Amino acid sequence: MNPELTHWTGPLGLPRFDLIRDEDFAPAFDDCLRLAGEAVESIAANAAPPSFQNTVAALETAEEPLNRLCAIFFNLAGVDSNPAREELQRQIAPRLAAHGSKVSMDPRLFDRVEAIMQDRDELSPEDRRLTELTLRGLRRAGAGLTGDARARMAAIRERLAVLSTDFAQNVLTDERDFTLTIPDSGLAGLPDWLVRSMRAAARERGLEGQIVTLSRSLIVPFLEYAQDRALRETAWRAWTARGDGSGAGGASTDNRPIAAEILKLRHERARLLGYQDFASYKLEPEMAGNAETVEALLSQVWSAARLRAEADADKLGRMLNEDGINGALEPWDWRYYAERRRKAEHDLDEAEIKPYLTLDAMIGAVFETAHRLFRLEAREVQAPLWSPDARAWEITRDGKRMAVFLGDYFARPGKRSGAWCSSLQQQHAIGGGERPIVVNVCNFTPPEEKGAPAYLSWDDAHTLFHEFGHALHHILSDVSWPSISGTSVARDFVELPSQLFEHWLEQPEVLDRHARHAITGAPMPAALRERILSARNADQGFATVEYLESALVDLAFHRGEPPTDPMARQAEILAGLGAPSAIPMRHATPHFAHVFSGDGYSSGYYSYMWSEVMDADAFEAFMEKGDAFDPEIAAKLEQWILSKGDSAPADELWLKFRERKPGVHALLKGRDLLDVAS
């Protein structure tokens, strides 16, 4: 086995990606799965009476080589996929699921942890919490099942691993293989910066002219600015066709039957464990607790958002008709006319904004914000990573290393779309302890040529802050055990730090210091800054409705009997909501990767809004002090939220920080929906 896969020798303890070859992974998985199996077996078969140290604590390190290997491989599969990695992912997914089932369904481990729970009062609070979570995980995995039910549960988990891998790879194939060549006659309305980006995308693929790809940083601005309605429709249909059998991959990437089978197997899995449906199973350990509570929150916001969106649809429809186009406003029209309206009402032009939002400047804004709040320092270092675009920083505080932070910001073929935060190494205090290695991945439009500035949109800048908010949850983690550190928290709590951190981008003092013109170095004019901030909710009806549609469809899919035809059920749910026809779901079922590429957000897409209730309320704590950088509130935020991981229940941590329950008022106010709701 290539030792670099499990014993990292690069700068700051990073893996040497330059010494790792694709052919190294298969034998490494063979070895690491064997070693993990042996380590867990020694714990389960231990003849000594069960104790916290010989069982629960031992499990925390039993699979460390496998965990490190998976961290490297699945990071590469997301940021730099190729046919060899995709094939290995298909091969390894059921093997990892089988190993996971064998461990988490082992009745001997279940009995040992259950026995330790009898004496849990003798444990420290964190050790007791870890023991409780370990037992809960074993129970929810099916360790208490016997006979046919046990065998069926293992089979379901293996099959789900295969299906979720296929789903994700189908979406990636459709995204990677689609390009739309735009003739010169189709460039009308497009700003120069977008045309340059389209031409750079063409050159990257060895093509002439200019193209639109399914990278969000290209296709969204194209839909916002392209005057050619037919080209907008073609681009929009390709974007929304990902995974439905009509995309670039054709029938071979049709995710609709995969989604149906996933929903069926999830329901069966929940029923085997004694739950009414998958939503009941999935929401039990979350802050919300049950589907009824989730639906109540979403419905409360839905009514206000729909009213705002309907009013906006009327205005945009009139603009369409004034252009001499008869008929209704269509989904490929909304962004175009919303952008025209935003420019007219707020005197805003993206071409005016972008020169002030370069990637390097906004990274500087992120780091300085983290410094002012938490005294963190960032020093860029050179390290052999997976792409020349990827960058590394050492994060320190008072001279002590807190983390290594990796950023991979540009879209490229073979990279999964979207933005996310992951880790190569979790913080923990076992032995001498380890500090985290955190990864932020985005898909911004790269610069036209090497060395030129990379320009961000306002939404891109928000994404940058959002993902670093997740990174802070890792960087400031201070717990003993890796499985409860960092972002290993309830799904509807995990978005709190990320969404909260976005608020600092909008602080005038941050923009005044970092939003400087790429050529002249002049600060963003105060008038422009104010126009940007006044327009941040310009299309909030659309944004809220498209999000809520996806969240409500996700929830409905997992309540009661699963639909045999998810697309028909999706249409039924959307019709019942009565949303404007020009606002489709943000993520239609065939490419709803949050829900079907694994079950992390299944029955849980609502969690962004659940967390937003808290993030709006949390930022109010700073505003009540009259200072967005108030040191007392920042210290409480670190003490009770960012450092604690899952060492205590999320609702308890929230109450320690805010000393009261959050309310939806701040969310509605932040989305400019308060007047509509009232």
Image: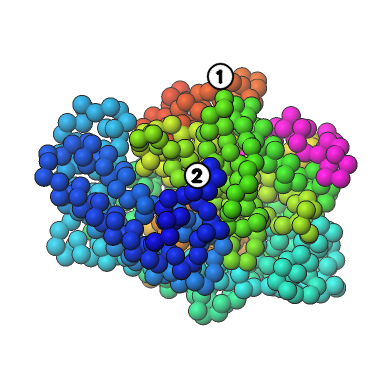
Is disc 1 surrounded by few (<14), some (14 to 19) or many (20+) residues within 10 Å? Answer: few
| Amino acid type of the residue that numbered disc 2 sits on in the rendered structure | Gly
Quadrant location of residue 472? Answer: top right
Residue 521 part of the magenta-drawn span: yes
Residue 544 image position (x, y, % from top left)? 60, 49
Q: Is residue 295 above or below residue 595?
A: above
Residue named by callout 1: 632
Q: Which residue is mark 2?
A: 13
Residue 371 appears left or right of 291: right
- Front residue (pair 604, 46): 46
Of all residues, the one furthest to the bottom in this rendering is: 251
Looking at the rendering, the stretch of residues picked out in magenta corresponds to 502-526
Q: Position of residue 559 (x, y in %)?
A: 36, 56
Q: Who's the residue at 59% across and 30% down the image?
A: 376
SS category of the residue bearing label 1:
helix
Please state which of the two labelled residues, at mark 1 or mark 2, is closer to the viewer. 2
